[in-house]
Image (cartoon, helix red, strand yellow):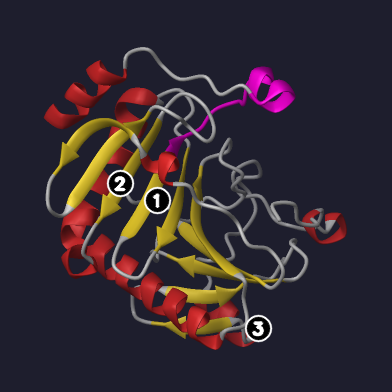
Amino acid sequence: MTHIIYNTNVGSNKPNTLINKDFKCPFCNRDGLKKEGRILRETNEFLIVENKFPVLENSYPAVVVEHNSCNEHIGTYSVEYLERLLSFCLDYYEDLQKTGSYKSIAFFKNHGIFSGGSIQHPHMQIIGFHNNNYEVNNDDFSGVTILSNQLIDWNFSNKPKSEFFEINLTLKNKDYLNEFCTYLQKSVQFILQVLNTKHQCYNLAFQIEEDCIRVKIISRGPTSILLLGFGIHQTPNNLEELAAQLRVF
C-alpha cells in the first residue's frame, strides 16, 4: 500500500522558513520545545522532537534536529559529527521497530525548496506507519559503480526512482559507520557543488536492514511532466563519466 492520506487542514498551518525568511525558526528555540513538552530524546548536539504538524494520517512522525545552527548541513559537518548523528538516529529507529507498532518506518531527509522541505534548519524525519508498508527492490540500488569493496557499494542509479541524478550508497557492515558517513557526505557535496548548483536541493531515503544500511541520495529540482504525467523516468547518458568524476571528487 503506497498511498496515504495527507491532512490538508494540518498542512495549511505548517510554517515555512524556506519561503518566509522572517518566520522564527522553531528548531533554534530549544527552550521553547522543552516548554511545549515535545522533546522525545536529546543530547547536547541533537534532538528528537514530536512533529507538531502530523500531516500523514495513521502515522507517528518524529523530527531529528541535526544541529544547533540553521546554517550548517551534512555537507559542512565533520565526518565524526555525522557519524554521531546517524548513530543517534539509528538508535531511535531501532527502538521504534522494537515496539512492534508499525508496519514500516521511513527515515529520510529533505534539503531545499524543491525537496518537499519547509524548514531550513537541518533536520531529518523518522515516521512510523501503522497501516502502510512500502516496497524496496534490489534494482532500486543498482547502477554504474563509483566504488565497490567488502564494505561499500556506491553507484549512480541507472534505474532512478525519480529521474536524472540519484546516488546509491550501501554499507554492508553497520560496525563501519564512519566509512558510510565519508561517502554519504561526499555524495551530498557533489550534488550541491557540481550536479545541482542551481537549486541546491536533495533528498536522502534510508533503508535500514539487519546487517546493512542503504541510502538513496536524490538530486532535486522541478519534476518533469514525463514523470508526473506518464511515469517515465529520465536517466542521464553520462553516468560513467559522472562516476569517474565523483571518484576523483
Q: Amino acid at mark 2?
A: Leu
- The residue drawn where x is 58% and y is 38% is 113
Labelled disc at residue 71: 1
Q: Nearer the viewer, mark 1 or mark 2?
A: 2
- Give the x, y percent position of residue 171: 25, 56
Q: Which residue is mark 3?
A: 36
Tell which circle, 1 or 3, labels the residue nearer the N-terminal end. 3
Query: Label 2 crowding class (10 Å Cα cut-off): few <14, some 14-19, many 20+?
Result: many
**Residue 29 appears in view:** yes
Between 194 and 37, the one nearer to me in the picture: 194
- Mark 1 and mark 3: Cα distance apart in space: 24 Å
- Give the x, y percent position of residue 82: 27, 61
On screen, residue 36 above or below 27: below
Quarter that holds the C terminus? top left
Q: Which residue is mark 2?
A: 169
Q: Amino acid at mark 1?
A: Asn
Q: Residue furthest right?
A: 9
Q: Amino acid at mark 3?
A: Glu
Quarter that holds the N terminus? bottom right
Residue span colored magenta: 218-231
- Give the x, y percent position of residue 173: 21, 64
- The residue drawn where x is 12% and y is 52% is 150
Element assignment for label 2: strand
